[in-house]
Image (tube, rainbow, N blue to C red):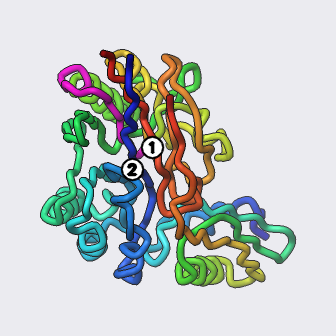
Amino acid sequence: MEAPQYVAARVQQALAEDGRTNELGIRVDIRGDQLFLRGQVSEAEQRTRLGQVAHETAPELHVHNEINIVDATEPGEDEHLD
Amino acid sequence: MSILTDLRIAAVGDIHLGEDGRGHYRRRLEGIEERADVFMLAGDLTRHGTLQEGKVVADELRDLPIPAVAVLGNHDYHSDLQDEIAEELRDAGVIVLDDDGVVLQCGEKKLGVVGGKGFGGGFAGKCASEFGEREIKNFVAHTRHIAEAWKVALKEIVADERVVLSHYSPIKETLEGEPPEIYPFLGSYLLAEAVDTAGADLIFHGHAHKGSAKGMTPGGIRVRNVALPVLGRAYGVYCLECEDGF
């Protein structure tokens, strides 16, 4: 059986290199037959695609897609640099 | 006596617009002219660096009521169409910096902006050097070349305030939150060294989505990581206090 570290590295590489996702900052953790995706993206569609690519890369694992959506709407408070 | 006037800069990086983002981003920029004098974009404007995505970004930024200055990021280089993307943006009225500078008139103030994509290599004491295989030498030389260009541009520019706009980070403080093992791919101290040598008032960068918002160069220049996931909002607004002596 392949060591989980290599599987996680392969999934992370797929998320970065697959043309559907090209997402670099996603953390991939594997515990037993469970795969966890964590990080932040700006759109729900991208989160779905990441889960899909992870599933295709490691179909034997159960994917938990825990990626957050950053919904940036308001510019917020100004910072004064004096 | 002296009066204080603020130069208000809206800044964000890593907006990563894909073709499904058309029409969405522009809405977030409504009213930006009331909050800021200039808008700066710190790279990674697209997801895969395709021309179609470049056109989406250009359309979302087209004819903003305030000047927009952008640099590209590594994602915008992914399809080897960085020059075409830059042209699309320029056609839409966006000033795209490529290791050079521009001076903007903001009210009575001249704001100089210097920058480009930047590159990696790591930070003093834990960085790659121009030694060994050609591939490593090319990697480090690329960053060194960029840093030198910024230094020259900063020295040449005549302005009241000078801001550096980069995609990669010049310091490691604003990378805190990222795994330390990947710092060499997130920035280089050569960028900070160049800016410290030539002088500037503020540095913006993106790229480090899990990094921290605030830091400072060894020379004391403020650095802000404006990557969208770090800001958690459409853009940050930074007010540079300009002092007019009388």
What segment carries the magenta color? Answer: B154-167
Host chain of mark 2: B
Q: Position of residue B230 (x, y in %)?
A: 59, 54
B10 versus A50 height, above or below: above
Image quarter in which the C terminus of chain B is found: top left
Q: Position of residue B217 (x, y in %)?
A: 51, 24
Q: Which residue is at a point 59% across and 83% down the rendered structure image? A: A48
On the picture, is B230 further left or further right than B40? right
Image quarter in which the N terminus of chain B is found: top left
Q: Position of residue B142 (x, y in %)?
A: 31, 34
Amino acid identity at mark 1? His
* Whether label 2 touches label 1, CB < 8 Å: yes
Label number found at residue B205: 1
A64 versus B235 height, above or below: below
Q: Position of residue A58 (x, y in %)?
A: 67, 78
Q: Residues within 10 Å of mark 1 (few under 14, many from 20)?
A: many
On the picture, is B129 further left or further right than B60? right
In terms of secondary structure, where does tag 2 sit? strand
Q: Is residue B132 visible?
A: no
Magenta segment includes A44: no
Amino acid identity at mark 2? Ala
In terms of secondary structure, where does tag 1 sit? strand
Q: Which residue is at a point 43% across and 41% down the rendered structure image? A: B204
Label number found at residue B42: 2
- In the foreground, A38 or B104: B104
Q: Which residue is at a point 52% across and 38% down the rendered structure image? A: A80
Q: Are marks 2 and 1 on the same chain?
A: yes
Magenta segment includes B156: yes
A23 versus B208 height, above or below: below
Q: Earlier in the sequence, mark 2 or mark 1?
A: 2
